[in-house]
Amino acid sequence: MDIPGPAGRLEALVEEPLGLPAGGAPRFAAMVCHPHPRFGGTLHTHAAHRLAKAVRAAGGVALRFNFRGVGRSAGTYDRGRGEADDARAALAWLARERPELPRLAGGFSFGAWMAVLAGGADASVRGLLLAGLALRSADVDLVRDTALVTSVEKPVAIVQASNDEFGTPDEVRLALAGSRGPRRIAAVPNATHLFTEDLAALQREAEAAIAWLMEDARR
C-alpha cells in the first residue's frame, strides 16, 4: 500500500500480529525503519524484516515503509533530514489508523537513527526499539549524535551484534551512559553489523526487547 509522505507517496507494508486468536486484538503498533538507502537498504532488508516479525510475534501491528526515493516511494535521498520526516509521517499514519494502540518506533542501522529522530520527541510513542545502532559509518552526511539517544526520557531497547564493526555493545553502553531514561542493551553473539550470522537470534532478542519496552511503558 501507499501512505502519504512529505515528498509524496511512501511505499509501505502493514502486517497484522502472528497467531492472533479469533476475535483477538493487537496489543500495540510499531514502525520499523530500514537501513541506509545509499547502501541498498529497503523495507525488505533481512534485519528490518526480522524486527517486523518480532513485532508481530509479540502481538503488534508492524508498519514498514521505503524511505523517499526507494522502491515506489517518491522523492530523492535527503541525507537523513527528509528521511526523518518520512518516519514522522509513518508514525502519524499509525496514530490516525490505529489510535487505540500504544506505539513504538524502531529501526535498523540508519533506520535506528531515523526512529530516534522521529520517535524520541513524539509524546505518543511509548518507547524505541533500535538494532545495529551505528556509532560510526562510511556515511559522512548522517548525524550520529549519541546525545539524541541519551536525552530521550522514554525507554530505549537496543539489540547490537557482538562484533558490530560500527559499534560494539560495550561501545554503545559507554556512549549511552548517563541516559535520562531506562535503557536495555542486548548482544547477539558472534554476529556482525548486518546480523546475517544469526538473524533468528536478532529476532529473539528483539522480541525480548519489546516485552521489556511494553512492560516498562505501562509503569
Image (tube, helix red, strand yellow):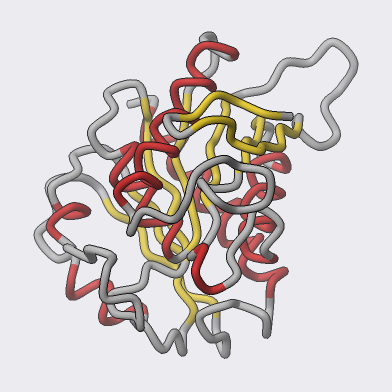
Looking at the picture, tell me which residue is in the foreground, 128 or 65: 65
Looking at the image, which residue is at 68% across and 79% down? 198
Q: Image height check: is 4 above or below 80? A: above
Q: Is 159 left or right of 81, judged from the image as shown? A: right
Q: Residue at the spot x=55%, y=51% of the render?
A: 69
Residue 77 in the figure: left or right of residue 147: right
Vertical arrangement, residue 168 with respect to residue 186, above or below:
below
- Work out which residue is located at the far right of the displayed protein and give it: 22
Q: Position of residue 156 (x, y in %)?
A: 33, 49
- The image quadrant that residue 123 belongs to is top left
Count of labels in the image? 0
Using residue 165 as the reference point, say whether residue 79 is left or right of it: left
Please provide percent x and percent y for residue 104: 46, 35
Check the picture and name the quadrant holding the N terminus. top right
Quadrant of the rendering where the C terminus is positioned:
top left
Q: Quadrant of residue 34?
A: bottom right
Percent position (x, y) of residue 96?
Answer: 51, 11
Where residue 122 sits: x, y (%)? 29, 28
Identify whether 126 is placed above or below 156. above
User: Which one is nearer the viewer's eye here, 7 or 95?
Assistant: 7
Task: Say which of 43 and 103 sits in front.
Answer: 43
What's the residue at 67%, 80% (across, down)? 196
In the image, farthest residue toward the front: 75
